[in-house]
Amino acid sequence: MMEGSRIKINEWLLPLSWLYGVGSDIRNMLFDVGILSSKSYDIPIISVGNLTVGGTGKTPHIEYLIRLLSKDYKVAVLSRGYKRRSSGYVLAKTDTPMEMIGDEPWQIKQKFPEAYVAVDANRRHGIERLMSDQETRDVQVILLDDAFQHRYVTPGLNILLVDYHRMITEDQLLPAGQLRERVSNKVRANMVIVTKCPRDLTPIGYRVVQQALHLKPFQSLFFSTFKYGNLKRLFGEGEMQLERIRKDNMHVLLVTGIGNPQQMEQDMRKFAQYVTPLSYPDHHYYTSKDAKEINRAAHNMPQPMIIVTTEKDAPRLKDLKGLDELVRDNLFVFPIETEILKNKETTIINQIIDYVHKNS
């Protein structure tokens, strides 16, 4: 098992996983033989997805692609808008409420207002609206968020993300494990990125992952990690350098509603000796009860203290009624970006740019 593995298999659910696998195999077979159809488009389409349920770092990698491509191309991001309180196709504006499009699309639109961000559970319909509607018809590249299983669309470049701490080769199908489909289906990917790697991953560590994944010759393998910016106040203006947490020996209350809070906690412990996690389910909509719990936890923290949350949680916490003055004065957002390891950044950039250029 990989170093730092967070895989837990519920072995008593393995019979249900077998049934789930049969259903998944039948669905994929229907696409493979053409009974269910997959459509291609005359525009570069890049899919970013995974084989597992939970956080593999899709949003930071989508943001990496936007930064890379938006210098030369008009970029659109199409998501299904998980847990949004709307239906059908919605094109985001900078003032679109988060509830209308979901937390991750909202975050992307706030950080990249020049990019088109749309949500539609029907990816074909969403692509066709982006390409035909007057206000978006100048789009040149479409990024599909979390679309590895959405086989009704054939992307020109299919990027599969694999969490270093939850290697797909050691996992099991739902519900015993967290795999959405069998590991063998990784063959659909043109590019595999192993995410959340330790920055000091050794050459032997790289080889172990490479051998475990056993990719085909046409598949490119890359490794990524997260790099961190200064903490930003959620309420009001101002930033704080991460080093100040260690320098002032601050206690950190870490409030998260994400798929993999353990990774966030581990990352924060690189900067803070004392971390108290307060975790909620992925994409959680915070309630007045949660506000009271956060207030209580903050008042119980030793001083000096700081409250830290994720970019994904920030819009839901900012709109939450009932957070008291102590919380609002000390609540900061922990921004992250993707960094490609092993001196392969130029290689991955060239592959992506070449694909877009040849298909534009």
Image (tube, rainbow, N blue to C red):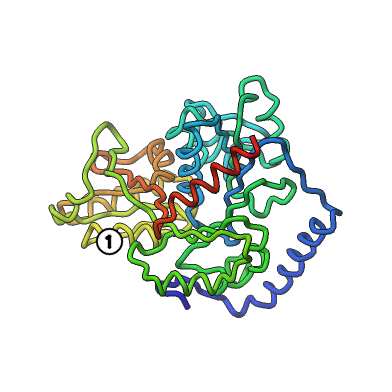
Q: Position of residue 147 (x, y in %)?
A: 63, 49
Q: Is residue 68 left or right of residue 219?
A: left
Of residues 299 and 356, which is closer to you in this image? Answer: 356
Q: Tell me if mark 1 has few (under 14), some (14-19) or many (20+) residues whose alpha carbon lies within 10 angstroms of its own.
A: some
The one of 213 and 179 positioned closer to us in this rendering:
213
Residue at the image point whose x is 44% and y is 69% from the top: 206
Q: Assign a secondary structure to mark 1.
A: loop
Residue identified by numbered label 1: 269
* Residue 329: quadrant of the picture: top left
Decide: is 142 above or below 280. Answer: above
Residue occupying image coordinates x 29% and y 43%: 332
Tell me what residue is drawn at x 60 percent, y 72 percent.
172
Amino acid on which the number 1 mark rests in the picture:
Arg
Lateral position of residue 147 relative to residue 297, left or right: right
Q: Please provide percent x and percent y for residue 98.
A: 50, 35
Q: Is residue 94 left or right of residue 126?
A: left
Extreme-right residue of the structure: 35
Residue farthest along the left direction in this orientation: 248
Q: How many marks?
A: 1
Quadrant where the C terminus is found in the figure: top right
Q: Residue at x 13, y 54 (%)?
A: 247
Q: Quadrant of residue 341?
A: bottom left
Residue 330 horizontal side relative to residue 101, left or right: left
Q: Is residue 214 above or below residue 244?
A: below
Q: Is residue 47 positioned above or below 273 on the image?
A: above
In this view, the residue in front, 1 or 272, is 1
Task: Provide residue 292's location: percent of width, then percent of height.
Answer: 34, 48
Relative image position of residue 285 (x, y in whole percent): 48, 45
As rendered, which of 174 and 293 lies closer to the eye? 174
